Image (cartoon, grey):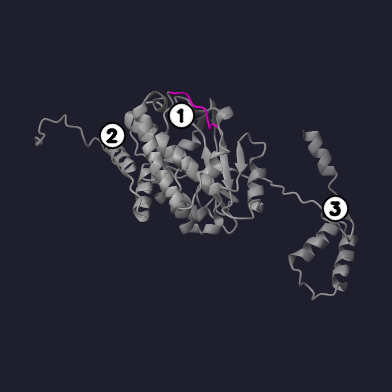
């Protein structure tokens, strides 16, 4: 590899100054105001220096991405944990850890946070984003982009999502690359094959990360939102693996009730999920004992993302006049489980006042 690289470097010759002078003279003879083509005039002169020709045709363009530093923006205890390394599929990684100030002006910022952590991270996100920074939020839900856009401007956002079923073990996190759908992203409106869409594809190419661009990113995001609401939440209340939807008509009925409410809200917002349903295939394969993120949070004693799931649907349903009884029940049940983890229902003390039931 080094020999090949050295050979390529030797083929890079100095700029042809005579060709650049000739190109500049040619520019001066054209029937136009001097400098009226701006940067294009500079590019044509530089291209002459590269090729040794005044007249050049660009019949095929390529976008080349040269990646420099890659790192993680973190502060405090999270930064210390990352500096000690993180395990993924049995391999230890030690990423570069930057402060927001050190990461300012990054070409690409990927936001991967729990919903409850987003408000506290907005100031850091604002410090990282420079004039040309692309921001991709891989968070669950359908409103993190709007929250971030309110801080940094909507033009920075490239809408995206990630589909990965992972779980934590003693040596870190594990997932199956062969059944993981990966990152899906795209522009909200044409041109869908924009330069930044192509730049992100070039960055991910060859990394082992599965990805694809789409012309229906909003529908893709709502499709994942539906998966989270219907499959993530009921199992968290029951405390059982995802096989419960296959093995219990009662769990299936709860999931279907949540789905019906979500679909009604999506339709009222003009979001046609059938566009992505016909191309989605069977999705990611998971074992029947798999525990999705909400149940993982409950198991670990953490607060969940229920506010971005049923909480968001309750708010949207109220705005649109669509009843959401299944989501309201699910929301309050999971909030109660959070309170249980917080110790609110610990009645083991001796001096507890009695309650009265009528």
Q: Say which residue label 3 marks.
A: 14
Image location (x, y in percent) of residue 37: 76, 69
Q: Say which residue label 2 marks.
A: 341
- Mark 1 burial class by Cα count in 10 Å: few <14, some 14-19, many 20+: some
- Mark 3 burial class by Cα count in 10 Å: few <14, some 14-19, many 20+: few
Task: Let me know if residue 48 appears in the view.
Answer: yes
> Viewer-proximal residue, 125 or 76?
125
Residue contact between numbered discs 1 and 3, judged by CB atoms under 8 Å: no
Q: Say which residue label 1 marks.
A: 167
Residue contact between numbered discs 1 and 2, judged by CB atoms under 8 Å: no
From the viewer's perspective, is the residue at label 2 or at label 3 nearer?
2
297 horizontally vs 140: left or right: left
Image location (x, y in percent) of residue 229: 41, 39
Residue at screen point 26% across, 34% down: 340
The first of marks 1 and 2 along the sequence is 1
Q: Does residue 126 lie above or below 116 as drawn?
A: below
217 horizontally vs 330: left or right: right
* Occupied quadrant, residue 256: top left
Task: Let me know if residue 73 appears in the view.
Answer: no
Magenta span contains residue 129: no
Is label 3 in a helix, a strand or a loop?
loop
Quadrant of the snapshot with the N terminus: top right
Marks 1/3: CA distance? Answer: 53 Å
The first of marks 2 and 3 along the sequence is 3
How many numbered markers are drawn?
3
Which SS type dominates the magenta stretch? loop
Marks 1/2: CA distance? Answer: 20 Å
Q: Magenta region: which residues?
A: 282-288
> Viewer-proximal residue, 263 or 220?
263
Is label 2 in a helix, a strand or a loop?
helix
Q: Does residue 119 lie above or below 166 as drawn?
A: below
The first of marks 1 and 3 along the sequence is 3
């Amino acid at each position: 590899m080094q020999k090949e690289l050295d050979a390529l470097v030797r083929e890079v010759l100095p700029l042809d100054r005579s060709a650049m002078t000739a190109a500049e003279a040619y520019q001066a003879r054209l029937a136009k105001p001097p400098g009226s083509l701006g940067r294009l005039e500079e590019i044509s002169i530089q291209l002459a220096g590269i090729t040794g020709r005044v007249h050049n045709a660009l019949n095929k363009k390529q976008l080349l991405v040269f990646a420099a530093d890659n790192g993680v923006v973190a502060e405090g205890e999270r930064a210390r944990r990352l500096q000690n390394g993180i395990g993924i599929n049995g391999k230890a990684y030690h990423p570069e850890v930057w402060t927001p100030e050190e990461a300012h002006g990054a070409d690409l910022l990927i936001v991967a946070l729990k919903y409850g952590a987003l408000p506290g991270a907005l100031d850091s996100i604002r410090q990282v984003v420079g004039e040309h920074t692309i921001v991709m939020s891989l968070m669950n839900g359908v409103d993190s982009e709007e929250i971030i856009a309110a801080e940094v401007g909507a033009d920075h956002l490239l809408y995206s999502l990630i589909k990965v079923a992972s779980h934590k073990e003693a040596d870190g996190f594990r997932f199956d690359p062969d059944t993981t759908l990966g990152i899906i992203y795209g522009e909200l409106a044409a041109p869908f094959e924009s330069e930044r869409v192509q730049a992100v594809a070039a960055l991910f190419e060859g990394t082992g990360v599965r990805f694809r661009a789409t012309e229906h990113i909003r529908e893709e995001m709502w499709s994942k939102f539906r998966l989270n609401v219907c499959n993530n939440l009921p199992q968290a209340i029951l405390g059982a693996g995802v096989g419960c939807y296959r093995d219990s008509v009662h769990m299936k009925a709860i999931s279907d009730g949540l789905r019906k409410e979500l679909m009604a809200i999506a339709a009222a917002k003009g979001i046609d999920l059938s566009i992505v349903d016909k191309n989605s295939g069977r999705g990611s394969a998971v074992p029947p004992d798999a525990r999705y993120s909400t149940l993982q949070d409950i198991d670990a004693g953490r607060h969940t993302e229920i506010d971005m799931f049923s909480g968001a649907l309750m708010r949207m349903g109220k705005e649109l006049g669509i009843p959401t009884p299944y989501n309201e029940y699910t929301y309050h049940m999971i909030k109660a489980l959070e309170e249980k983890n917080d110790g609110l229902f610990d009645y083991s003390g001796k001096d507890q006042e009695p309650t009265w039931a009528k």
